[in-house]
Image (cartoon, rainbow, N blue to C red):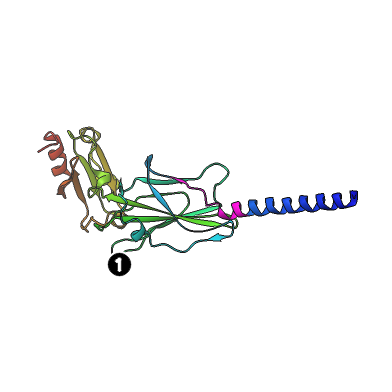
Amino acid sequence: MKRKLLFYGTTALLILTVLIAMDRYKLYKEEKPPIPEITVNGQEVTSILGQYDWHGTKTKKIEPIKVMAGMNPTKVKEKQKLQVSFPPGLEPASMTISQVNTAPGLKKKSVEGNSMLIPKSLTPERIYFMIKAQWKKDYSTYYVKVDIEDLPLFYDFLSKDPEKLSVLAIVPRGESEKYDIPDEVKAKLDSFHISDDMEGLKKKYPELLTNLTPVYMIFNSEFHQQTVVDKETLINRVLDDGRD
């Protein structure tokens, strides 16, 4: 009798252990990947979960442009930082952020890491980004939809003070000192930039079309206002109160 009770008790315990293990495995299989916090300059960006392979559960690839068709885009600006962070203890081993769409003929931007500067959109369409997170055995994708506001041309050289001008001097290679301007003239400007790297400037600012040097490009706080080729003309322009 005791042997039978021991046998039944052991069997029941084994069955219970198996059932608990099966439940735990089922929960493990059904669990979804962690959801990251995605921000642009601190502003939270709405995201959706895409394709993933998580704890043995695999999902099919989605078409984010169709899936997110009814979602409002997050308004962002060119050169702002898109940042991705996961809950502590669930950080992936690697991450890639890449553009899903762009203007025809242009390369889609892609970076490795948890942050990326928002590129110029060059298209009236909404821009979509995919974040792919890779763990040791698992991976997951996430998508965001943004409306990018492009910055004005030559944004980096615009005056930050609406009451002052700023100047970009582009000069022949190795002759920066020759074409520099006096400190008392610079003091009347919001900023003065001088460069002898025409090709480098053109790569960074495709809107720069001139090949002529020296040139002095004059900016107010909103746009490129005037170009002069003579240093004395520039100095007279600035000392003449610096404004039209």
Q: Residue at x 20, y 47 (%)?
A: 216
Assess whether residue 30 is covered by the magenta stretch.
yes
Name the residue furthest left. Answer: 244
Assess whether residue 105 is covered by the magenta stretch.
no
User: Quick one: 202 or 58, which is closer to the camera?
Assistant: 58
- Residue 41 lies left or right of residue 30; in this view the side is left
User: Quick one: 199 or 138, which is closer to the camera?
Assistant: 138
User: Where residue 150 appears, x then y in whole percent?
Assistant: 26, 50
Q: Quadrant of the C terminus?
A: top left
Q: Residue at x 82, y 52 (%)?
A: 8
Image quarter for residue 186? top left
User: Quick one: 12 or 54, which is closer to the camera?
Assistant: 12
Image quarter for residue 205? bottom left
User: Where residue 125 appears, x then y in whole percent?
Assistant: 26, 57
- Residue 208 lies left or right of residue 86; in this view the side is left
User: Quick one: 128 or 29, which is closer to the camera?
Assistant: 29
Which region of the structure is painted magenta? 26-37
Image quarter for residue 101? bottom left
Total count of labels: 1
Counting other residues with Cα less than 10 Å from the Cα at mark 1, is it few (<14), some (14-19), or many (20 or more)? few
User: Where residue 129 appears, x then y in whole percent?
Assistant: 38, 55
User: Where residue 161 appears, x then y in whole percent?
Assistant: 22, 34
Which amino acid, by three-letter code, is at mark 1? Answer: Gly
Q: Residue at x 42, y 62 (%)?
A: 62
Which residue is denoted by mark 1 in the rendering? 105
Name the residue furthest front. Answer: 1
Disc 1, SS: loop
